[in-house]
Amino acid sequence: MTSLDVQSAAVVDDRDDHLDDDYALNPAFVEKVVDAADRGDGLHLRELLEDLHPADVADLMGFLTSEHRAMVVLWLPPDVLAETLPELDDGIREEVLERVPAGRLAEALQELDSDDAAAVVEDLEDDQRRIVLDAMPEQERAAIESSLSYGEETAGRLMQREVMAAPQFWNVGDTIDHLRQQGEDLPELFFDIYVIDPGYRPVGAVPVSRLLRSRRDVALTDIMEAVTEIDVDLDQEEVAYAFEKYHLISAPVVDPGGRLVGQITVDDIVNIIQEENREDILALAGVSDQGRDANVLSVVRSRAPWLLVNLFTALLAASVISLFEDQIATLVALAVLMPIVASMGGNAGTQALAVAVRSLAMRELNRNNATRIVMREVMVGILNGTGFAVLLGIVVGFWFGVPMLAVVIGMAMIVNLTLAALAGVLVPLTLDRFGRDPAVASPVFVTTVTDVFGFFTFLGLATLILL
């Protein structure tokens, strides 16, 4: 077996010790950590934690109690603690930060890029933040304070100020010599060298891979590529859209004067895309991300408001049913069948809504193609409604032996599925038009439309045709 094989086997064995095949933490490993923390065996804890990736340490924190976390944090080396802090869930990070001495925290933050350090400092209480920043060197403190001066969820807050820039009169050899001289002062992660003019404005970028393949005497301006500049005040969701649309690995961030002030790399964008997707999914269900450590009362408080809204919409649907009490009493089959119409409409509306919200988020649905998309969904609603009307009509005809009842429920099915498809597109479009998040409020409106009109259409048609 070669030395490479031995090293590879060691890595696999180490991974198998604390990770399952799906890269989730092994429950047996978590138990070992809990046991060591219960015994106060710090040396064993350090031995267990020393080979963990910071992301796995952050994952581990989510499975531990507050007391166990305090013990784990105590035995984490400063560099591992530094890389773990940005990976933690917000609630857990705030708790951990309360337990880390200011001096140790200041030391750990110096190991991070300015964007990650700013994200951690942002979670500190004002007094603790002041103490930690005062304990940091002037340059690192200024970079963090500058990042925090930008609005939340903007490119300025997301960017890292460490960036590799080269004047436009340099050649490949000048740039490579500079990189070697800078050494530890270079950004921890960068993919491009930004070529700047005398006003420190980016005029192009040279990928590191192209730089290394080029001759030393080649001018940077001869091999540079055009760059997609990101405005420092641009919303992070717009930044993520630009990265996805143009397949960017990194991008320069510029101030209102066009001067280079930082860079955003794709690793930050992956987090933003996941965060935005998670928020949209939760918003569609009317809940917020409470995290693994949320207590019962906080979860109740976050969910109760939307349940209250749903209660009022349910009462509205019930009031429609109450208008037809006599008809339902005369033909009990109406009470049996009317939930089917509303339920099918609700599901059809949810399908159209999910597609519309996703299309709005991906900028695939706007005023230029809105009419075409609306008409498409209406046709889908009509065709689905017709198909299921025939199927349900046959079932109802054999079930109750009343042919006209089958006709009524079939007609109601077509109408409600068409209205559901229409509402599923028009509601999020309207909310987006007025600057509201369509993922948050759309489900309530669409459900109200399908329930109210589903009951009213079915019971109204039954009254006109059967009674």
Image (cartoon, rainbow, N blue to C red):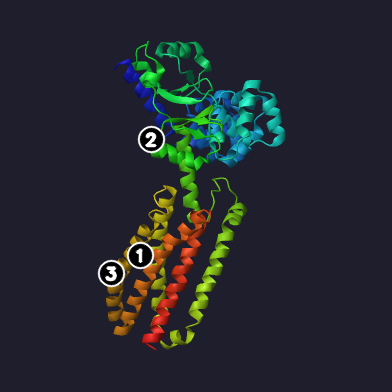
- Look at mark 2 in the image and give the residue it sits on: 247
Q: Which residue is mark 1?
A: 378
Q: CA distance from mark 3 to mark 2?
A: 42 Å
The kind of residue tagged 3 is Gly
Please identify the quarter of the rendering in which residue 79 is found. Answer: top right
Mark in front: 3 vs 1: 1
Residue at horizontal 70 percent and vertical 32 percent from the top: 128
Q: Left of 453 or right of it: where is 141? A: right
Characterize the local packing of mark 3: few (<14), some (14-19) or many (20 or more) Cα atoms within 10 angstroms: some
Q: Quarter of the image containing the N terminus?
A: top left
Query: Which label sits on residue 387?
Result: 3
Relative depth, front residue between 315 and 83: 315
Q: Residue at x 40, y 78 (%)?
A: 458
Q: Earlier along the polypeptide chain: callout 1 or callout 2?
A: 2
Q: Of helix, strand and loop, which one carries label 2?
A: loop
Q: What residue is rendered at 39% in x and 72% in y? A: 341
x, y percent for residue 10: 38, 23
State the quadrant of the C terminus. Answer: bottom left
Local packing at callout 2 (Cα closer than 10 Å; few below 14, some 14-19, many 20+) is few
Left or right: where 19 falls relative to 48: left
Q: CA distance from mark 3 to mark 1?
A: 14 Å
Describe residue 167's horizontal placement relative to residue 409 as left or right: right
| x, y percent for residue 250 | 44, 30
Secondary structure under the numbered disc 1 in the rendered image? helix
Tell me residue 221's x, y (percent).
40, 19
Q: Kindly give the residue lying farthest to the right in the view shown.
A: 127
Q: CA distance from mark 1 to mark 2?
A: 34 Å
Question: Are dots 1 and 2 in contact, CB under 8 Å?
Answer: no
Q: Amino acid at mark 1?
A: Val
